[in-house]
């Protein structure tokens, strides 16, 4: 699987360009890593290789050179995870592979989109989450009442 030409055929390739939320994409990284380890063992990509397939590889598949890595002149969309989480104990020894080898479930701690923080401390900052949840529950309740 280390052949970049195969990146588009991996399970990860389809997941990265879908409309899933970040938490689901993070799980896709881990699943892709585990599937490759299961079927290819020593020839399987590392956790970091999987991360590069998800970022640079997907940008290449989309024909985009303005995304896929953090460097000057590229879009600065990113997320951050507090590595002090209990489930990440020991991950500091290979941080670039964590998303593939250990995986991360649940909300991320910070997200930056177009240079703007959209998630802070695991909570959306662009909307009132409680208000949106209440409005959505009200809509569900109204819909179900009609049934």
Image (cartoon, helix red, strand yellow):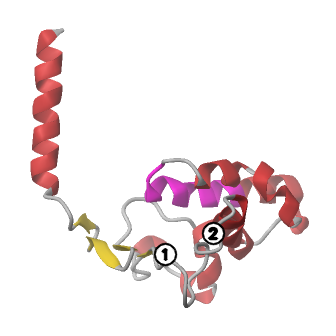
Residue 129 in picture, x, y percent from top left: 17, 55
Residue 59's image quarter? bottom right
Are there few (<14), some (14-19), or many (20+) residues within 10 Å of tag 2? some
Residue 60's image quarter? bottom right
| Element under disc 2 | helix
Residue 35 in picture, x, y percent from top left: 75, 52
Q: Is residue 1 visible?
A: no
Residue where numbered disc 1 is placed: 88
- Quarter of the image with the C terminus is top left
Q: Which mark is residue 58?
A: none
Q: CA distance from mark 1 to mark 2?
A: 22 Å
Label tally: 2
- Along the viewing direction, whichever of 114 and 146 lies nearer the viewer: 114
Residue 90 in picture, x, y percent from top left: 55, 82
Q: Nearer the viewer, mark 1 or mark 2?
A: 2
- Quarter of the image with the N terminus is bottom right
- Along the viewing direction, whichever of 64 and 18 lies nearer the viewer: 64
Q: Which residues are magenta?
A: 20-33
Residue where numbered disc 2 is placed: 55
Residue at left 53%, top 61%? 26
Q: Earlier in the sequence, mark 1 or mark 2?
A: 2
Residue at left 63%, top 69%? 55
């Amino acid at each position: 699987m280390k052949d970049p030409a195969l990146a588009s055929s991996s399970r990860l390739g389809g997941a990265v360009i879908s409309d899933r939320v970040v938490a689901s994409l993070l799980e896709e990284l881990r699943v892709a890593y585990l599937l490759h380890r299961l079927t290819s063992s020593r020839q399987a990509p590392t956790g970091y290789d999987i991360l590069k397939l998800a970022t640079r590889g997907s940008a290449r598949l989309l024909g985009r050179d303005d995304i896929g890595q953090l460097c000057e002149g590229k879009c600065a969309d990113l997320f951050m995870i507090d590595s002090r989480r209990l489930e990440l104990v020991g991950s500091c020894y290979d941080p670039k592979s964590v998303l593939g080898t250990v995986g991360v479930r649940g909300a991320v701690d910070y997200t930056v989109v177009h240079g703007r923080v959209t998630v802070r401390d695991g909570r959306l900052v662009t909307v009132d989450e409680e208000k949106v949840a209440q409005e959505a529950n009200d809509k569900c309740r109204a819909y179900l009442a009609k049934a």
